[in-house]
Amino acid sequence: VQLQASGGGLVQPGGSLRLSCVASGRTSSPLVTGWFRQAPGKEREFVAQIRRRGGMTPYGDSVKGRFTISRDNAANTVSLQMNNLRPEDTAVYYCVASDRSDSVGYYWSADSYDYWGQGTLVTVSS
C-alpha cells in the first residue's frame, strides 16, 4: 500500500485546513487508516484513526473536538478536517495504515502501523 498525503500549508491561528490521504497499490482499503504528527524536537503523536468497517474513531486528546477524520471507501481516501488550529498544531502530519488486528486495540502506537506516507507540513502561525 502506498499512501499519498496532501493539503498541508500555512494557516493563521483559529483557521482550518483539510488533509487528504489517498491509498493506492491494491483494490481493497486497509483495515485502519489514520494520522500521526511530529513537531520539531518532539515525539511522534497519535492524531486520529478510522476503520474500514466503521465504528469508533479515536482521537488524540489534544485534537478532540477540533479535528474530524472521515473516509471515502470508493475513492480509497481518508481526510482530516482540522478546525480552530493552534500554533501547537504545527507539525509534519503523516498518513498511516495497517491491516493488523492490533492496530485497532493499540491505535495510539506508531508500531501498530505498517504503512506510512511521506508527510505533509502544517504550520499554524500569524
Image (spheres, helix red, strand yellow):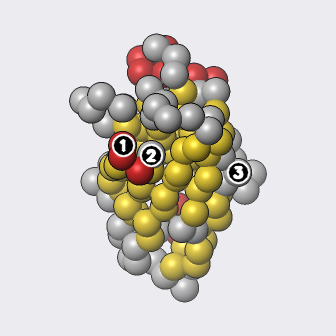
The kind of secondary structure element at disc 2 is loop
Query: Which residue is painted at 42% across and 56% down in the image?
Result: 80
Q: Can you see residue 45?
A: no
- What residue is shown with label 3? 118
Q: Amino acid at mark 3?
A: Gln
Q: Position of residue 63 (x, y in %)?
A: 39, 51
**Answer yes or no: do the residues labelled 2 and 1 have beta carbons within 8 Å?**
yes
Left or right? Give the position of 52 relative to 108. left
Q: Amino acid at mark 2?
A: Asn
Q: Identify the image quadrant of residue 25.
A: top right
Q: Is residue 9 visible?
A: yes
Q: What is the three-letter code of the residue carrying label 1?
A: Asn
Crowd rating for badge 2 (residues with CA inside 10 Å; few <14, some 14–19, many 20+): some
Quadrant of image for the N terminus: top right
Residue drawn 52% across and 52% down?
21
**Numbered disc in front, either 3 or 1:** 1
Residue 14, given in percent of the width and then of the height, sits at 39, 76
Provide residue 28's location: percent of width, then percent of height: 46, 32
Query: Which of the two residues, 84 or 82, is positioned nearer the viewer here?
Result: 82
The label number, if any, that marks residue 73 in the structure image: 1
Figure quadrant of residue 18: bottom left
Q: Which residue is mark 2?
A: 76
Instruction: For mark 3, give the secondary structure.
Output: loop
Q: Residue 22: percent from the left, percent from the top?
A: 53, 51
Furthest residue to the front?
Answer: 27
Q: Residue at x 28, y 54 (%)?
A: 65
115 or 38, nearer to the observer: 115
Query: Residue visible at 59% across and 74% down?
Result: 9
From mark 3 to mark 1, how far is it between C-alphas? 21 Å
Q: Residues within 10 Å of mark 1 (few under 14, many from 20)?
A: some
